[in-house]
Amino acid sequence: MRSHLERVAIVYVRQSTLVQIREHTESTRRQYDLADLAARMGWDGCDIEVIDCDLGLSGRSATRRDGFKQLVARICLGEVGAVFGLEVSRLARSNADVARLLELARFTDTLVIDTDGVYDLSDINDRLLLGLKGQMGEAELHWLTSRMNEAKRAAAARGQLRLPLPVGFFYDEDQNVVIDPDEEIATAIADVFAAFTATGSAYGVAGAFAGRRFPRRAYGGVWAGQVRWGRLTHARAVAILRNPVYAGAYVYGRRKSRQVVHADGSVHAAVTELPREQWEVLLLDHHQGYLSWEQYLTNQAKLAANRTNAGARPPREGSALCQGIVLCGGCGRSMQVRYQDRLPRYECSHSRADHVATPWCGSIRADIIDVAVAEAFLAAADACQLSLALAAAEEVTARHARGLRGAELAVERARYAAQRAERAFLACEPENRLVARTLEARWESALADLAEATAMLATISQAQPAVPDPGQLAAALTDLPALWQATTTSDKDRKRLLRTTLADVTITADHDDPTLVHIGLRWRSGATDLLHLRRGKRAPTARTTDPAAIDLAMRIGPACDNAALAAALNAAGHRTGTGQPFDGVAAANLRHYHHIPYPGLLHDGELTPRQVAARIGVSVGTIHYWINAGYLAARRGPANRWAIPFPPEVEAACTDRAASSTHQHRDQDHQPRQPHELSVAQVAHRLGVKPDVVYRWTQWSYLPARRGLAGRLWIDFTPAVEEACLQRIASSPKLPADIKAQAQQRLKRKAV
C-alpha cells in the first residue's frame, strides 16, 4: 500500500448525458466525493486528481472520451497508484474497454477502488470479480436500451411516439400534429412544393427562393423549439422534399445507425437512410399534410431521375437539345456533350476512356443533329398543346400570387414586431435608461425590418408578369413551331418538351461514306424513325475555294489582271471559301496562294520605283513622294504596283529635281556597300546602345562613316573601331550603368 500512496490517485467522474448532469446532481456529487475517500485512505491532497472531462459522454465506446484515454495513458506510464470510481460501469460500458484497462492496471500494479471495496488486479479473485462487474455493466446497458427501444417502437407503431417535427408543423394541446398556424411559415413550405412542381429540381427550388427568407426550427441550444429565419439552401430544399411528414405520413425508422471502424482504428457511428420498404413504421394520413402521398411519390421519382451519379440524365441548361438521351450507334453507350468555343458537340468519350471504341465512334456537331431532331419532333407533335400552354400560364400567375402572399405576410409579421417593440418602449419608465436604451434599439431594428419587408413587397408587386388571357393564348399558341422558336422558351424547356414524346436518339456513322450520318429516333409510343443527313465539312476544308474555281483561275489568270479575274470567276458562278463573291482583293489572294503568275507588269520604257531610285540616286520613299505629289507620272499595274514611264527627258528632269532639292544629301558616295561596313542600326545593336547615340558619334566624327546611295550612312566598323566605341561607352557619364557594365565586361574579355 505504501508504494501506491507514493503515486497519484485519480478520481474518474462521468455521466452519460447532459440531462443526467443537469437533473441527477446527487450522482455527480457522490463521484466528486470520492476525492475525500482517497484523502481518508492516506493520499495527500496534492496527489489526488479528478478527471471529469467525460461528463455528458456515453461509456459505450472510448473513441470520443478524452478523459478515459488520459486515464489509460497515465496508468501505462506507471504514474497512478489507484483509480477511484463510483462503480466499474463508470469507467466503461464496454467489456472490451474494461478488460483492457484492468489488464494495464495489473501490469503497473494499480489499484481499482469503488464504493464496494479495494481491488488488487494481481489477485486472481479481484480480477474475476471486476471482470464480472464489467460484463454486468455491459449487459445492463443492453437491457436498458432494449427496453427503451421496444417501448419506443410500440408507441411508434400506434403513431403516438412524439418525434421532433420539421418546420411547418407543431403539436397542439392534445399532442396532435397540425400545420403551423403562422401563415407566413405555412405559405413558405407550400411554395417549396409548388416551386418543385414548376422547376422539377431542388436546385430550381433554391433559385426560386433567392432573396426570400425561409423558416427553420431549432432543435437545440438556447433557440430550441423556436423558429429562426434564413435562406433556403439546396440541401434544405432536398431534405424538405424527401421528408414524408409533409405528405401527412407518420414515419419511424427512416435511418439506421451502425458502428464503423476507420483506418486509424477509431470507431464512429454512421447514420444511413434506409429504403422506403425497410421503414419500421409508416402510417399514411396520420395528419394533415402539404401534399398527398401520391404527389410525394411523384416527387421522389423526379428527385431520383435528377441523380446523375446514379446514371440519370435530367435536362440541363445547355444548348445541346439531345443532351442526356443521345446514344452512340457504334458502341451503344451514351454520348457526352462537350463545348468547344461555346459550340456543343456530341462525343463518344466513355468508349475511348475504356478502350472499347469502335471505328464508328466519334463526335459530331450538336447543331446538325438538333435541327433534324427538332424538325422531326415538330412534324410528329399533335395540335393539342393548347391545354399545356394554358396550364403554364395559370402556373405563372399562381407562382406570382404565392410570392406576393408571402411578402404580404412578411410585412404583417414585421409590422406586428414593430408595434410590439413600440409598446414595450412606451411602457418602460423614462428614468430607467438602461432598459430604455435596449428597448429603443429593438424598436429601431424592428422598424428597419418593416421597411425592408415593405420594399420587398413593392418590388414583387411591380414585377408581376403580363400573362395573356386564355383566348389570346388559344390564338397565339396553336402554332407549336412558333412557340418552339420563341426567344422566351429556354433550352431546358425545349428539352423537357422533347422528352415528353422522344425516348432517345442514336447516332450512327455510315460504314462506307464518312460524311453520311444515320439518326435513329425512338419515340415513347414505341414507334421508331430513321433520318439521314450529311455532316458539315471538317474545319481544315470548311473555308476552302472550289477546285473548279482554282482551275479556272490557273488557266486565265496569267492573261488578265485581278479585276478581270474576279469578274470571270463570278460570271462562272464561283464563290470564295466563305461564300462571298470574288473581288480584286480575293482574286489577288487566290493568285498569291496558288502561285498564279501576273500578266506583264511593265511596258516598254517603264521602270519600277526602286529602279528609278537606283538610277537617280535617291531613296524609294522620295520616288513615292514624287508620284503622290504629281511630280512624276505613273500607273498601277495588274498587281497594283507602280509602273513609271521613264524616257530620257523624264530622267533628266528627275536628276535636276534631285540636284536642286534641299532635302537631298550632297555628300553621297555612289560606291556600293563594302563587306566590312555596317548601318547605324547594326552598329547600335552590336554596341548595345540606341541608334541616336551612333548618329551623334558620326556627326561628331567619332566614327568613320560615309553616305551611300539614298543618303544612307555606312560605317567602317573594324575591330579597332569597335574597341574604341566600347571604351567610350564605359567612360561615358550619360549612359546607363548597366550598358556601361556590359561594355566593361566585353573589354575585359577582349583583353584576355
Image: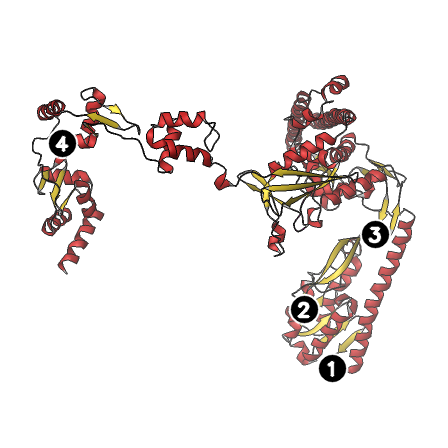
Secondary structure found at label 2: helix
Give the position of the N terminus as an image quadrant: bottom right
What residue range appears in magenta? 327-331
Left or right relative to 193: residue 158 = right
Secondary structure found at label 1: loop
Q: Nearer the viewer, residue 29 or 570?
A: 570
Q: Residues within 10 Å of mark 4 (few under 14, many from 20)?
A: few
Q: Which residue is mark 3?
A: 253
Relative to 608, residue 109 above or below: below
Measure the C-alpha gap from mark 4 to mark 2. 108 Å
* Image marks 4 and 1: residues in contact by CB distance under 8 Å: no
Secondary structure found at label 3: loop
Q: Residues within 10 Å of mark 3 (few under 14, many from 20)?
A: some
Q: Which residue is mark 2?
A: 71
Q: Is 329 covered by the magenta stretch?
A: yes
Kind of residue at badge 3: Gly
Q: Which residue is mark 1?
A: 122
Kind of residue at badge 4: Arg
